[in-house]
Amino acid sequence: TTACVVWGVGVFLHALIIVGYASNGLLMRYLCVRRHWFEVLNLALAGSTVLVASISVEVSQSNAFRAALGYVVYDKWMKFLDQLRLIRAVGLHVLPIDATLRSVGPFIGVLLVYLLAATSLYFALAIDKQGFIQCFFWMYHLTVLGEFDLSELLGASSLRLVADADGSLRQAEADTTEYHYILPWIIVFMSFLIGVVLMNLFIAILCHSYTLAARRAKEDLLRDRAASALEQFAMREGVMTAFCPRRAKSIRRRRGSNMQQVYAHRTVTRHSEKIEDMHDA
């Protein structure tokens, strides 16, 4: 019951924000913000999770339900961090980290291509009839984590049991496979290319991105505070629109509302900042 109430309050408040944007003629701007789409999807997932948990006990014990519940809890913690970064003492340290994490997308794409190439190379050897997904995880452990077992990659055990003349068993080294001399060189090449070169480039990209993000941390903090204040203003406008029809009519008749003026100012500011970044680059 408590979970349903909390979810209902969240849906109601977000609905007020949508009404506030729509009443000021800014519905398209609301739809253009990716964070709003994620919030709607998270509310839908949270609602379905709460509904399933209240209806069926058997379904609530399934792995899919637990995974969905885990994601909902994870999203709540991320929202908690998102609110904490509005505090100056916290935001000046958290915002550069968040900006750095968002800037590594191109590198992750390049790393994924290299991992798929290494996985395809290993998968083409058809060692022990392993699946592509299993090969991908092994290549990830080899190249990124630096953890691997040569006997597992060769598809054979490093030891075998040998029967002596008296009938006792003892351990001995396993026979070499057909890839015994080829695969180690492949491992050396892939581990150096991905594990050494790309990972050091990743560290360099992180340092460079964090340095740039730390320089503009104050501007990002002000922008996030302005966005949060705008959300609260949109919620207030939504309350007035939903419960005061006359107020809603007056808002629609005005050519430029306060929210429209704020959005126009933010658009001009962002364009000027992009131009300054281009000049700095």
Image (spheres, rainbow, N blue to C red):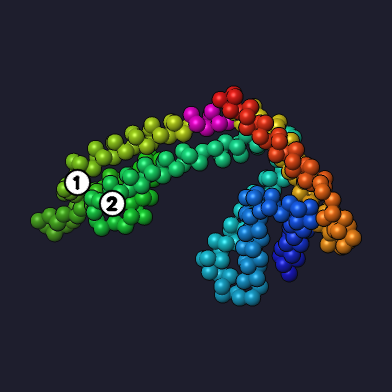
Label 2 element class: helix
Q: Residues within 10 Å of mark 2 (few under 14, many from 20)?
A: some
Q: Main secondary structure of the magenta part?
A: helix
**Which amino acid lies under the numbered mark 1 shown in the image of this protein?**
Tyr
Nearest the viewer among 147 and 35 is 35
Q: Residue at x 61, y 76 (%)?
A: 56
Is residue 147 among what the camera can see? no
The residue type indicated by label 2 comes to: Phe
Compute the Cα span from label 1 to label 2: 13 Å
Is residue 213 placed above or below 262 in the rendered structure? Answer: above
163 displayed left or right of 85: left
Which quadrant, please, contains the C terminus?
top right
Q: Is residue 81 left or right of residue 253?
A: left
- Residue that numbered label 2 is attached to: 123
Circle 1 SS class:
loop
Q: Please state if 106 lies on the left or on the right of 68 as rendered.
A: left
Taking depth in this image into account, of 78 and 114 the one nearest to the observer is 114
Where is residue 54 shown, x and y percent of the image? Answer: 66, 73
Q: Which residue is mark 1?
A: 179
Image quarter hosting the N terminus: bottom right
Q: Position of residue 133 (x, y in %)?
A: 36, 55
Point out residue 61 in the picture as x, y percentages from the top left corner.
Answer: 56, 70
Q: Is residue 160 magenta?
A: no
Query: What's drawn in magenta, residue-wise?
Result: 204-210
Q: In the image as oriented, which residue stretches furthest toward the left?
A: 165
- Judge the density around disc 1: few (<14), some (14-19), many (≥20) Cα neighbours within 10 Å: few
The percent position of residue 124, horizontal first and vertical second, equals: 25, 51
Identify the residue shown where x is 62% and y is 66%.
49
Residue depicted at 46% across the width and 41% down the height = 108
